[in-house]
């Protein structure tokens, strides 16, 4: 089982909302966390491990 992110990779906020999500980085597999607000607004995230950037 893959570990889950506990904070939003973009904003640093805890992932407590029902519509927040976590998924593995497409390049290296490190967990990426996304809060509902950052997902809806399309805020860019950067993987802390490999530097992959996504919307």
Image (tube, rainbow, N blue to C red):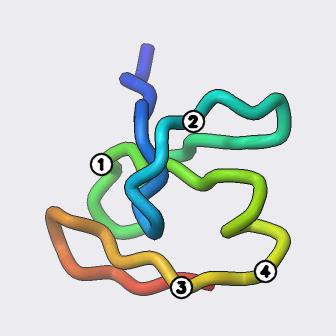
Mark 1 — residue? 30
Front residue of 47 and 9:
9
Mark 2 — residue? 15
Q: Is residue 7 left or right of residue 18?
A: left
Marks 3 and 4 close (CB-CB < 8 Å): no
Q: Which mark is residue 45?
A: none
Mark 3 — residue? 44
Q: Position of residue 19 (x, y in %)?
A: 83, 40
Marks 4 and 2 close (CB-CB < 8 Å): no
Residue 16 in which image quadrant: top right
Nearest to the eye among marks 3 and 1: give it. 3
Q: Residue at x 82, y 29 (%)?
A: 18
Q: Residue at x 48, y 52 (%)?
A: 8
Q: Position of residue 7 (x, y in %)?
A: 42, 42
The disc, 2 or 1, on the residue closer to the chain's N-terminal end is 2
The disc, 1 or 4, on the residue closer to the chain's N-terminal end is 1
In what element is the residue under mark 1?
A: loop
Nearest to the eye among marks 2 and 3: give it. 2
In what element is the residue under mark 4?
A: helix
Q: Residues within 10 Å of mark 4 (few under 14, many from 20)?
A: few
Mark 4 — residue? 41
In what element is the residue under mark 2?
A: loop
Q: Spatial distance from mark 4 to mark 2, Cα to Cα?
A: 16 Å
The disc, 3 or 1, on the residue closer to the chain's N-terminal end is 1
Residue 49 in which image quadrant: bottom left
Nearest to the eye among marks 1 and 4: give it. 4
Q: Is residue 38 left or right of residue 22?
A: right
Q: Residue at x 41, y 86 (%)?
A: 53
The disc, 4 or 2, on the residue closer to the chain's N-terminal end is 2
Above or below, 9 relative to 44: above
Q: Spatial distance from mark 3 to mark 1, Cα to Cα?
A: 16 Å
In what element is the residue under mark 3?
A: loop
């Amino acid at each position: 089982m893959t570990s889950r992110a506990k904070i939003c990779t973009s904003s640093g906020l805890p992932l407590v909302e029902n519509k927040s999500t976590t998924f593995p980085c497409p390049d290296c597999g490190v967990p990426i966390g996304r809060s509902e607000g950052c997902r809806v607004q399309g805020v860019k995230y950067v993987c802390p491990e490999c530097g992959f950037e996504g919307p």
